[in-house]
Image (spheres, helix red, strand yellow):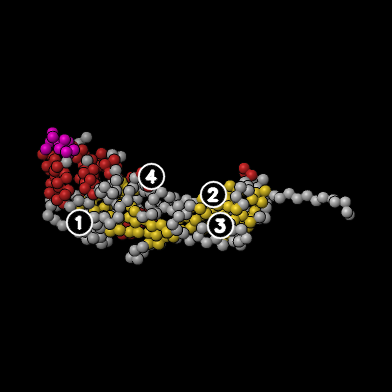
Amino acid sequence: MPLIATLVAGLLATAAGAQATPAVHADVSAARADVPAVHGAAAGVQGVAAAVRGAAPVRDPGGGSPEVTGTQKGRTSVINLKGSRIVLSGNGVKAGRRDGYRLTSPCWYEPGPTPEEMLKQQESSPDHFARIKADEESFLRFLEQFKDKVGKPGRWWTPAYNEDDPRGISCWTGLEMFIFVPPNTTPPQGITIRELTDIARAALTVPEPKIRLNPDAKSFVNLPTWVWLDGIGETTRTATATLPGIMSATVVATLKSIDIDPGTSGDRAKVSEDCGPTGKPYVKGGTYSCGVSYLRASLDQPREVYQLTVTTVWPVEVADPGVDVQYQPVRVGVTRDVPVGEVQSSVRDDGTG
């Protein structure tokens, strides 16, 4: 492998190392292992010369620490961010159901090291030292692009992407390995509050409830079957995406209603949907208003049951009034089999006629 390709292939691991915080736990070094060395070399050489365009304002990163914490790995993982400093938090990013929302752009640039930090990383990297032992002169030439920026205002920006998005890796490979960006400037495809809000929306999950019925084990023709949900917990869920010390975006989902699909056509079932957010639990002597009355037995259906689906509807709002975007509600459905029988009646002659 040519020397410059070898040098650049290790760049992101060290540059992103300065970005990553313990709260994020993102596997940055593994991300670049999937990319051909040819792209790494070309991007590394082009990165310094990349023209910085666009004027969407982002405050130049300074000191400070994140106000929220979260994790992006393990059982609570909701989207898999690679090469990113973004921290996800909120009761809506814990274990739950996503609705498949996709980011508008699955890859982006994030602000990273200062010029001084970047130069120090490249000069002191043990990996780089091991690679350049045979040709220190080439390595010194490689460092010139970083030395040239020392003392100048701005930061190096590096790419990140959502690995769970099938478009993520191909989008990411089209970005430069690093670009230098003046303060109060956002480069093309640099992350903004709008994109950060999108990431919070993609991370949002809601509970997967359980359907409760009365009658429970089996219903009968023309008998109202009450429907309600268990396991909802909090009916407001939030997701926050934070770039520590830079900006933060929050979305809020609030459970509003449920939709009931009886699993058959209107001539076989009548649905009542005065249900409120979670349905109406059965109360002896109470007024039925939420559920389904099946008009025909299920014996002629597959497996001799109707498949009832209850979908929770969670409208989504953006907490920051400065972000002009509207999202569709989160909709999560759960199903349950409902066997429906007929009450058999018989007429007896008592001999009095």
Pick the residue in front: 351 or 188: 351
Give the prevailing secondary structure in the magenta stretch: helix
Q: Position of residue 265 (x, y in %)?
A: 62, 54
Please name the amino acid that badge 4 sits on: Arg
Mark 3–mark 4 Cα distance, whole angstroms, equals 32 Å
Mark 4–mark 1 Cα distance, whole angstroms, equals 31 Å
Residue beneath the point at 62% across and 52% down: 215
Residue beneath the point at 11% across and 42% down: 140
Task: Count residues near mark 3 (Cα–Cα under 10 Å), then give few for <14, some for 14-19, many for 20+.
Answer: some
Mark 2–mark 3 Cα distance, whole angstroms, equals 17 Å
Mark 2 or mark 1: which comes first in sequence?
A: 1
Q: Quadrant of the C terminus?
A: bottom right
- 81 lies left or right of 311: left
**Labelled disc at residue 63:** 1
Helix, strand or loop at mark 3: loop
Tell which tag, 3 or 1, sits nearer the viewer: 3
Please name the amino acid that badge 1 sits on: Gly
The residue that label 2 is drawn on is 335
Tell which tag, 2 or 3, sits nearer the viewer: 3
Which residues make up the magenta segment? 126-136
Mark 3 or mark 4: which comes first in sequence?
A: 4
Mark 3 or mark 1: which comes first in sequence?
A: 1
